[in-house]
Amino acid sequence: MAAMRPTKSLYLLGFTPFFLGSACRVSSPLVHRDAQQQCFPYSSSASSETFGFRIAASFSAKGHKFNPKTDLFSFKQDDQRQAEIADASPRKRPDSGQDAFFVSNIGNSRNVAFGVADGVGGWSDSGIDSADFSHGLCERMADIAGKASTRSTWELIKKGDFKARDLLQKAYNAIVEEKKIRGGGSTACIAVGHSNGVLQVANLGDSGFVQLRPNAVYFASKPQTHAFNTPYQLSIMPPRMLARSVAFGHKPLSDQPKDASVTDHTVKHGDVLVFATDGVWDNLSSTDVMKLVSRYMVGFNGWANGKDGIAASDQLDVLTTEGGIAKERENTLQALLAVAITGEAKAASENTKLDGPFAREVQKYYPGEDWHGGKVDDICVVVAVVVKDDSEV
């Protein structure tokens, strides 16, 4: 299989690559017809019901064999915060390569912040490992969320004090001000979830998320790219690289958290939220992920047939509680889903015959490139199953 050279490093120095095709993925034909009606102002969207976000993450580094028993993290919401999953120290990082993730309660509440970040590999051409940036960014976001005010997150949101893009901005500012990371870049797709059913997502770059309901893609985010295979990215550029770029008369990328696409959503009992890096989306479409999730949700009776068709079952609370699935490690429905998506994306990335979304994009815009099969990359997935919860926040 002929390899097409990535151009991310060219953009870092301000050079324009020779191809400028769009990397936007085609929307799923199964997107719910009401999906465009779900975005709303915060002030009118609060629900009298309360919900819990049952969360798990799975990951696999490029070139490493995927182990579903060890490449898995399950979030226990009763813990105040779990920033250690994104510890920026290389020895303590999960085996996710340049991809990173975080999950944390917000302060002492049962509201949550979570998401993924993908270190941009093109920086390696300049001797910089973007894993430091992506993992550091996630560690800061988990830390900021965990130390947030103990006031109701809903009050914070209404006052504009705690929004997804603000969380990304504060974490980015912290990395820049600390000056411990000399350079690198990362995409990010993060969420702030409130127990009244409000979910705000900030997405910068080509990571992304889908909101799934029984047998339907209810919402799918769109990637942000400057050009094909060149995503929006937060970055720190070393002075020497910046000086070199200026000397050549080029303007380097300078994407900021304010450039992130922000969307507001409502969630309901039985929704499945999948946040993933492009190691998933380059190899699986949103429809592929929906079909995979549906198979497990129906198979384990998380979604069940009723008089009005397939709907969330009343067993979800048990299935998403530790031990709800009779397995040693992936013993919750959310863990099972995270592992299944990671495993499917890993297999697709290594398949040299079956063309995935990335291969189809290459063939569409650059038919002269002999690219077939999947795209090998780091993979990181965070899955949240929404469960109606009567506990007080």
Image (tube, rainbow, N blue to C red):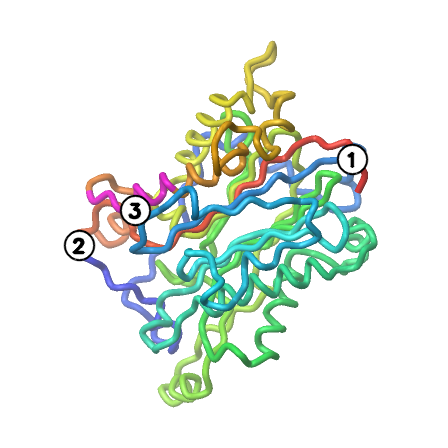
Task: Looking at the image, tell me whether mark 3 or mark 1 is earlier in sequence order.
Answer: 3
Assign a secondary structure to mark 1: loop
Q: Is residue 257 magenta?
A: no
Residue located beneath label 3 in the image: 349
Left or right, 113 with respect to 329, comes to right
Q: Nearer the viewer, mark 3 or mark 1?
A: 1
What separation in Å lies between label 2 and label 3 (alpha carbons)?
A: 21 Å
Could you tell me if residue 255 is visible in this image?
yes
Q: Residues within 10 Å of mark 1 (few under 14, many from 20)?
A: few
Q: Report the front residue among 102 and 310.
A: 102
What separation in Å lies between label 1 and label 2 (alpha carbons)?
A: 58 Å
The amino acid type, in three-letter code, at marker 2 is: Gly
The amino acid type, in three-letter code, at marker 1 is: Ser
Q: Residues within 10 Å of mark 2 (few under 14, many from 20)?
A: few
Chief secondary structure of the magenta portion: helix
- Pointer 1 with pointer 2, Cβ within 8 A: no
Q: Could you say which quadrant of the image residue 196 lies in?
A: top right
- Pointer 2 with pointer 3, Cβ within 8 A: no
Task: Looking at the image, tell me whether mark 2 or mark 3 is earlier in sequence order.
Answer: 3
Residue located beneath label 1 in the image: 391
Magenta stretch bounds: 343-352
Residue 18 drawn at (x, y percent) = 27, 67
Mark number, residue 368: 2
Residue 291 drawn at (x, y percent) = 42, 29
Q: Residues within 10 Å of mark 3 (few under 14, many from 20)?
A: many
